[in-house]
Image (cartoon, rainbow, N blue to C red):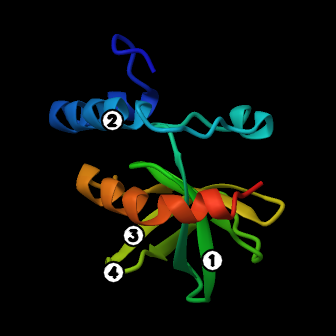
Amino acid sequence: MSQSQPSPLAARLSPQRRAHLRAVEERVSQLTVIQPRPAEDQHEQRAAPRIRVAVPVIITLHTGQSFHSVVHDLSISGFSASAMVRMEPESRCIMKLPGLAGRQARVVWWNASIVGCAFAEPLTTATLDELVERYRHAATLHPSA
């Protein structure tokens, strides 16, 4: 992402949040980053790079239905996870991370039992760092497709 041309999401953020986003992007650029699959590239523009992890979560749909899942990649702005239940784009959900309060998110896409969501409020750098440190090793033991 170019410093001179922020992403559409970043352009809508306050200067303080944009500075935070730039700091996180710099930290994340030093990690191994997942490249989006070609089909995803056509339908979305990510606000931040995602990092491969394997985080056990509980996802609650807007209907109240909940299910256990695994987050396969994570960034301050969103995640992708297993979702055997079809999740409609633009619908809302809550993702419960281990040891943290539920995070509200919007479904961006669902394809072949994988869902991509954008957080309503970005994760903090400290939260992202903690989750990556805690769950990154599991992702290398069990790589996702």
Q: Residue at x 69, y 64 (%)?
A: 142
Q: In which quarter of the image is residue 12?
A: top left
Residue hosting label 3: 103
Q: Nearer the viewer, residue 3 or 50?
A: 50
| Distance between the alpha carbons at the discs numbered 3 and 2 | 22 Å
| Distance between the alpha carbons at the discs numbered 1 and 4 | 15 Å
Dot 3 amino acid type: Arg
The kind of secondary structure element at disc 2 is helix
Residue hosting label 1: 69
Determine crowd level at label 4: few under 14, some 14-19, many 20+ residues with C-alpha closer than 10 A.
few
| Distance between the alpha carbons at the discs numbered 4 and 3 | 12 Å
Q: Which of 135 and 17 is in front in this view?
A: 135
Q: Which residue is drawn at 42% across and 30% down?
A: 29
- Asked whether residue 121 is in view, the answer is no
Q: Is tag 3's residue or tag 2's residue first in the polypeptide sequence?
A: 2
Residue hosting label 4: 99
Disc 3 to disc 2: CB gap under 8 Å: no
Determine crowd level at label 2: few under 14, some 14-19, many 20+ residues with C-alpha closer than 10 A.
few
Residue hosting label 2: 27
Dot 1 amino acid type: Ser
